[in-house]
Image (tube, grey):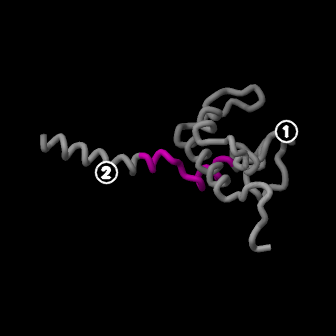
Amino acid sequence: MRSALLMAMLLFSIAPAAAQNNRGDPEAGKTLALRTCSTCHAVAEQQTRPAMDSAPSFPMIARDPAVTEAGLHAFLQTPHSVMPDLILSRDEIRDVIAYIMSLKRATPPSGTQNPSR
């Protein structure tokens, strides 16, 4: 009984660290997106425009209130006729999602003003 309790405590102490590792690295996601996605999308605010006008920018994707981590995960794992078939590893998908979600947190909702103005 005692060993089962100790095992459960160990698992609960490891779980937050494991969940943290599944979150992805936003900086690695930005680097990957600039290298891979910027052919069609504006990936960062400093890009003036994407190569394809029909491709939404990453900041625009991030501002969409319907965009979630789960939705992005499903989207990036599904082939699309309008996008090239990119083969990304699980870590790369997590990193790109972490980058897009960081833009969501960094971008004020539309209609709000910048307090520094």
Mark 2 or 1, nearer chain start: 2
Image side of residue 2 versus residue 65, left or right: left
Place of residue 47 in the rendered image (x, y in percent of width and height, measured from the top left): 79, 55
Q: CA distance from mark 2 to mark 1?
A: 46 Å
Place of residue 57 in the rendered image (x, y in percent of width and height, measured from the top left): 77, 47
- In the image, is residue 30 part of the stretch drawn in magenta? yes
Q: Main secondary structure of the magenta part?
A: helix
Q: Which residues are magenta?
A: 19-33
Image side of residue 100 versus residue 2, left or right: right
Amino acid type of disc 1?
Ser
Place of residue 103 in the rendered image (x, y in percent of width and height, measured from the top left): 67, 54
Amino acid type of disc 2?
Ser
Quadrant hosting residue 84: top right
Q: Secondary structure at mark 2?
A: helix
- In the image, is residue 112 part of the stretch drawn in magenta? no
Q: Secondary structure at mark 1?
A: loop
Q: Nearer the viewer, residue 3 or 115?
A: 115
Residue at screen point 66% across, 33% down: 86
Q: Which residue is mark 2?
A: 13
